[in-house]
Structures are given as structure tokens and as C-alpha cells.
Amino acid sequence: MDLTLDDAERELAELCRSFADKEIAVRAPAAWERAECPTDLLREMGELGLLGMLVPERWGGIGMSTVGFVAALEQLGRADQSVAAAFQAHVTIGSVPLLLFGTDEQRERWLRPLAEGRVLGAFGLTEPDAGSDARGISTRAERHDGGWLLNGRKTFISNAGTDMSFGVTVLARTGDADNGPRFGSFVVEKGTPGYSIGPKMRGIGWRGLDTRELWFDDVWVPDDHLVGDPDLGLGQFLQTLEVGRISIAALSLSLTQAVLDLSLAYAGERRQFGQPIGSFQAIQFKLADMATELEAARWLTYRAAWLRDSGQPFLKEAAMAKLKASRLAAWAASEAVQIHGGVGYMLESPVARFYCDAKVLEIGEGTNEIQHLVIARALGC
């Protein structure tokens, strides 16, 4: 296994690092403070071809490898987690269902503008009473008048309510069978009668990510809005979620790298008892542990990405990477605040912003409790 980036992957990572340093790091913190999604930055990323990263050129993307995607996301997330979260949700669960399960007509109609960065993609799974228990969703889709009638409610849905959003691909029950409920995925475009979007939700972190509740009140869509099999939508989404877990792991790597860099710089500048605090073992050991655990998490994440690129099973490895990297990010952010002391506790400090952003990494794209279950089942439990 060779995880050395090839020329295209390295050039993409360098492009993302440059854009992150020159644009995202400068403009995104203000959007975080205002709790607004900076779609101007996302549009510029679209113009650079970044929003179609995992989509083949045939459908308007750049056809990057999963390893290249992880390398790019690491660079973007170092600057701001909200922008990187919006980016990864668009590239993975917002686009991949159409890529994997859509028809050519659907790919031309919806995937191409997503890949070309003209619109922003979203997927609706979570409901007030169903999240980790995906089979428990109650939103229903019933055959009606040559199409489907959708009724229900979704919550914590990213990217659906911006001025750049095209709509949402939503998972709904299509019926029941002896072996359990059946599900399908449906594209619901913005402006469809009966489809309404709630106000932006306020989280302790990812404040620049657009997250909302969605309502479906007798929303009718024609048959050509069904993505994939009307009975196998849940399995299709779970297949998409596997790459989503890799992306959350990559986000976690980027946050850990960011707080490690901030802590190293602060440890060299801050003086106590006549010397930099970085000269004390208590601080050195924290930094050494951060760096060591980051390398371990990075290898897990890149190996999961490499397995996907190689066409090999990667379900267990993606869950392991997400579990390890997200726990590390939450711990490293806490240690970084400790190293910064009172400065790190103030929201004006970049490390405080990363601390607020870190917790959701243990929740999104399947909670860490779910990752434990996925891993245990893969081990034969």
C-alpha cells in the first residue's frame, strides 16, 4: 500500500491549501461569528472545480480519487470547519447518491450542476424521532397520480436552505414488507409546492454551516424524481454514508492539525516563570501526544480512502477512521484550550472556535456509538 500522493492529488491539495490560507481563513471566521453560511466562498470553490471532486469528468466533475479528496479536505478544514463541512456534505451525501444510483438523465439534470458548483447539494435522512435508527424514519412516500406524494419532517439537514441550494434528496418510507419497511430516495427541488424550510438552526459549533428543519406536506414529485430502487433506498444511502464517514475522519484530522499548529505556536510565544511554556514537560507531553495520535488517525483515514479507491471493502475501516479521528479531534481541541489557558477560552481565539466545532464530529455521519456497532459486527459479533 502506497499512500504517496500522485501529481494530480498533490496539486489539488496545494490548490486547496492556497485557497484556504488566502480566502477561507480570512473571511470564514466572520461568517462563523454571524452564524451565516458563506456561499460566496463555496461559489468560488465551485469555480475552481472543487465541488465536483468525486464526480467523473463525464458529469462535470474532476474525477479525483478518495485519497485526493481526503488530502484536499485536510487543507480546507485547517482554515475553517464550517466551510469544510458544507463542502464535504455536498461532495459526499449531496452528490454521490445521484452518481451511484441515478439515471443518466438524472445525472445530467441534477448531478452536473452540483459537480460544476452552480448549486449546493443536500440529503435528508435524520428526523426528530429517527437518526441512528435510520429504519425508524416516518416520512412517507406513497404512489399517487403517476408520481409520489411525500409527507413528513426532517431535521439537522445541511446545505438545504442557502441561496445556492437546489433542493434536497430525501429518504422516505415507500411501504412495508414481512422483513421490515422499504425505503426510496427522492429529489425534491426548491419551490416544490408543500416543501418548506425552517429557519437556520443554531449549534455550539459549525455556526457557518446552514442546518435546518424541512417539512413535506403533500409534496408531489413525478416518477423521474425517484433515485434508484424504490425499495432499496436505505441500503443505497448507507453505501453512500461509508464515504461520508471517511470525510468526517478527514475533517477531524484537519481540526487536530489546526489546534496542534496553534498550540505549538502559542507554546513558543507564551512565557511563564521566565521561559516559554513549551519548555515545560507538561506542555511538551500534550503536544507529543497530539502529534502521535494524529499520525495514527491519519494512517487509518488514508487507508480507508485507499481501500475505496482500490475497489475493496472499506466499511469497517471507514468506521474505525471516523471513530478514532473524531475522538482525537475532541480531545485535542480540549487540550489546546488548556495549553492556551484563559486566552483559549475566549471566543475571539481561533482555538476556541475549533473547540466549539469539535464535538459534532463525534455525532455527524453516524454517532461514534454506531461506529462501535459497525466495527463489532464486522468483527463477527
Image (spheres, rainbow, N blue to C red):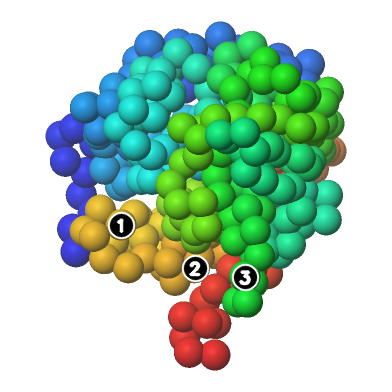
Residue 315 percent location from the top left of the image: 43, 67
Residue 360 percent location from the top left of the image: 70, 48
Residue at the disc numbered 2: 320
Question: In this rendering, is residue 326 above or below 341?
Answer: below
Residue at the disc numbered 3: 177
Q: Label 1 crowding class (10 Å Cα cut-off): few <14, some 14-19, many 20+?
A: many
Question: In this rendering, is residue 375 above or below 353?
Answer: below
CB atoms of marks 3 and 2 within 8 Å: no
Local secondary structure at mark 3? strand
Residue 96 percent location from the top left of the image: 42, 41
- The residue depicted at 36 percent of the width and 18 percent of the height is 116
Front tag of 3 and 1: 3
CB atoms of marks 2 and 1 within 8 Å: no
Residue at the disc numbered 1: 308
Quadrant in the picture for the C terminus: bottom right
Q: Amino acid at mark 1?
A: Arg
